[in-house]
Image (tube, grey):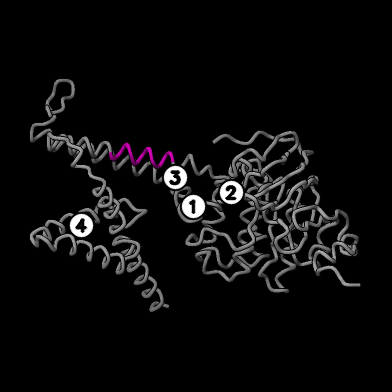
Amino acid sequence: MRAAAPHSTGDILRVDNLAKAFGGLRVFDGISFDLAPGEVLGVIGPNGAGKTTLINCMCGMVRPTSGRVLLGTKQISERRFDVVSRMQVLRSFQQTNTFRSASVEENLYRAERFGTAKGGADLKLPGLLEEFGLARHLNEPSDKLPYGLQKMLGLLMVLIGRPRFLLLDEPAAGLERRERHQIDRFVEHAQSLLSCGILVVEHDMDLVKRLCPRAIVLEAGRLLADGSPAEVLSRQDVMDAYLGPSDE
Amino acid sequence: MPPATLFGADLGTPRSLVWVTLAVGIVSALITLAVTHRFRPEFSSIEENETLAESLGVPVWWYRTVGFMACSGVSGLAGFALVNMLSTAHPSSFASFSAVNYIAYAFIGGRGTMLGPVVGAAFLVSLSNIFSGQGQFAAALFGALLIASVMVAPDGFVGLVRRMIRASRKRAKGNHA
């Protein structure tokens, strides 16, 4: 396998007029925004707004109907999923997603083996495993772990790929409230270790407010608002999108 | 068919037949061992969770192609050994149903191991020889055997034995503690 060419650290991830339709069903269109290295961008919006499909298009899993996704000057929306992953634009999944029958250790080994960033930044992995409660379970099959631990394992596997851009699809979904601060710590670690750009699709507004200086709102397939979470959440049209328009 | 020759030496005599078949078997085993040993993490990951494997950077199509090429090459070698022994080759010897049998050997014996298909083939071939004495019931008996085997040993006989060994070790450890 070829190693990905080294990139300058300043490349931004640009979504340019992106549209996706499945047959006649339009998921979104005309979506444009930038994600800079080191930035944490929240993506919020009601169910069915196209948030997960947006991540699917950005990571190469799904071809957009039109528009482009650019990493620096390289167009990545025409490339295969695994190629985009090896360019270190990496995603996590909403549900737990591990190699089920393999042990925790084997899962981590595979993540390291499959990535292109061998010998990249030192992740201080033993410390992370300890912090997220996985260190005691290294030899257990990953599908025997509690839900929260499986989710953290999935996130650490993505981190091992040394993402330059990290696309998190509802990282806190299904976690208990007391487990959710682990997502904060995970994002902090990803930033301090790799200074990667992070896109967080999330329904937990408190989490978005804590983590994201900037958030965009998707609603019915269009980009409704772009600004600080407090600012966008105070807008009437955003509230209407979530709760339905009020009668007054 | 005329017997195969190598640098003028006849490979169809009874003595050379044994040696050639043995050599083909060893070469096939070595190729299989090399490919599966080298790519086991990729193959297992693609089998278990293709999307996750891709998301971590595995070019799935490439490993599929490698797997397919290695399988085809080894099957081709086996075909050569067979035809060399029978000194006849006819399309009817390889009806599409025989492919089902070969896959059944691997499933019944145990996938993901080299021993599995050998065990599966030995077991099913010898039993189908016994069943063939039952005339019209042969196919039904064979089918019942497949169902029973899959129910008793879902990951094949080799998997079953492995699981039993692991369980008895665990029990021994438990008693010890």
Q: Is residue B113 left or right of residue A216?
A: left
| Residue type indicated by callout 3 | Phe
Residue at point 31%, 61% (across, down): B156
Q: Is residue B101 magenta?
A: no
Do the residues at discs 4 and 3 belong to one chain? Answer: yes
Please tell me whether the stretch drawn in magenta is mainly helix, strand or loop: helix
| Residue closest to the far top | B8
Residue marked by disc 1 = B45
Query: Counting residues from the N terminus, which is met first, the one under dot 2 or under dot 4?
Result: 2
User: Residue B124 bears which disc, if any?
Assistant: 4
What residue span does the magenta drawing correspond to?
A: B65-75
Residues marked 1 and 4, same chain: yes
Q: Amino acid at mark 1?
A: Ser
How far apart are labels 2 and 1 at the CA level?
10 Å
Distance in Å between CA atoms under marks 1 and 4: 29 Å
Q: Residues within 10 Å of mark 2 (few under 14, many from 20)?
A: many
Q: Residues within 10 Å of mark 3 (few under 14, many from 20)?
A: some
- Could you tell me the amino acid type at mark 4? Leu
The residue singled out by tag 3 in the image is: B39
Q: Which comes before the other along the chain, label 1 or label 4? A: 1
In which chain is the residue bearing label 4?
B
User: In this rendering, which labeled residue sits more in front, label 1 or label 4?
Assistant: 4
Instruction: Give me the C-alpha separation between circle 2 and circle 4.
Output: 39 Å
Subunit that carries the residue with mark 2: B
Write down the residue under mark 2: B56
* Helix, strand or loop at mark 1: helix
